[in-house]
Amino acid sequence: MELPQMPELMGLSLLVGLLALMATAAVARGWLRAEEERGGRPVRQKANGTKKSGSKKQKQSQRIRKEKPQQHSFTHRLLAAALKSHSGNISCMDFSSNGKYLATCADDRTVRIWSTKDFLQREHRSMRANVELDHATLVRFSPDCRAFIVWLANGDTLRVFKMTKREDGGFTFTATPEDFPKKHKAPVINIGIADTGKFIMTASSDTTVLIWNLKGQVLSTINTNQMNNTYAAISPCSRFVASCGFTPDVKVWEVCFGKKGDFQEVVRAFELKGHTAAVHSFAFSNDSRRMASVSKDGTWKLWDTDVEYKKQQDPYLLRTGRFEEASTMQCRLALSPDTHVLALANGTSIHLYNTRRGEKEECFEQVHGECITDLSFDITGRFLASCGDRAVRLFHNTPGHRAVVEEMQGLLKRASTESTRQRLQQQLTQAQEALRSLGALKK
């Protein structure tokens, strides 16, 4: 019997070994696939679970972001009312010339009209005018209180709204078909309508003041040459337009019309000179015979502007007071209609001064949650209004009542007739009663 040759045995053993390796590899691959299927599902489920929990957290954070911020809380014994209907921050307000309404505008795309007779009531009603596809930053009533104008934040132009009274006592607000043309090249800082109804003023933060007619045509362009404008306004008598800015003065121009009401020209009238640094703001008295100003030099000043400027007569300085806060930050100013009280606002605080004595009488701190954006007395001088967040806050003007008491007591000593004494005594008694009701009568 012959034994097989060695090469044949080796080839056979190699073939058997290769088949064994292939079988082992196939078994191992199947085992790994089974393990992946068993171990992979929980991993994927965990990953999905992480996604779900992550999406829940995102939704919760979105809900938190959507929640409205809380209203700023403020209380004071002289706080008469807080008007709260806006859902955005209020940037401007204006009292109507007849004293019946207060207009406010905010970045919630609305203008609200409030009834002043409701100020001391528990509920404060308002009528809403919507500003389509934009929001108003400034608002002013027309002299006849049948319309108001607004400055559009995105449109950079004026829009006119007409007010039509309904049978139920409310108003329908209708925007005119066309806005005013765009003319300013810098942000607008103030607008105004002359009480005569003859012209509109707009002022921007460069050195431009524009005088318009009511149809949207520019009558005159004023270059203030003050480096930049910080404030501008029309006088209540409608004769003057004034501006202040980087220079230490307030410049006043006269807007001249002919006997037939046709526009003629704008001429320089006079200047308020006496500050040593930039002027933040100014205000006219109700009769336009007095002006007040506040400057970065840390002072406020009261001026007699009832002068014959055409004969080169300059305004007289009546009083200078200290207001150190003005040297470090921008300030706003309001002068009571009778000029007895000066209100100054910086940041979120308001300071009230007696202009006859130059003394600070009241201070309201942290009045709003944001910096105060506007400050104004109502036409009677009974209330001071301020805005800065989503509310308007109204204060009793106790310094005004005290000033009346001082004035009446002085006039009584010089009264020569009994009828005059009776009239002065009546006014004195009314002011004292108002102070007593507010717990502010000094003994």
Image (cartoon, rainbow, N blue to C red):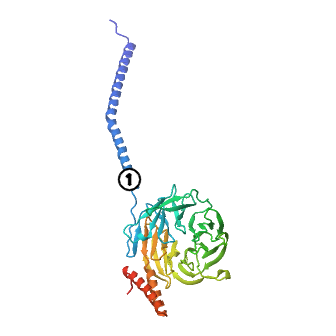
Query: Which residue is nearer to you in this view: 359 or 146?
Result: 146
- The answer to whether residue 107 is seen in the rendering is no
Relative to 135, residue 398 above or below: below
The quadrant where residue 399 appears: bottom left
Query: Which residue is nearer to you in this view: 97 or 36?
Result: 97
Q: How many marks?
A: 1
In this view, the residue farthest toward the front is: 167
Looking at the figure, which quarter contains the N terminus?
top left
Mark 1: give few (<14), some (14-19) or many (20+) Cα within 10 Å: few
> Residue, x 44% and y 75% (percent of image)?
383
**Residue 140's x, y, as percent?**
53, 67
Residue 58 lies left or right of residue 235; in this view the side is left
Relative to 242, residue 4 above or below: above
Residue 235 lies left or right of residue 54; in this view the side is right
Q: Amino acid type of disc 1?
A: Arg
Q: Identify the element where label 1 is drawn.
A: helix
**Residue 102's x, y, as percent?**
47, 68
Residue 232 lies left or right of residue 27; in this view the side is right
- The answer to whether residue 340 is seen in the rendering is yes
> Residue, x 46% and y 84% (percent of image)?
404
**Residue 126's x, y, as percent?**
43, 64
The quadrant where residue 157 appears: bottom right
Query: Which residue is nearer to you in this view: 60 or 167?
Result: 167
**Residue 188's x, y, as percent?**
57, 64
In this view, the residue farthest toward the top is: 1
> Residue, x 51% and y 62% (percent of image)?
163
Q: Which residue is mark 1?
A: 63
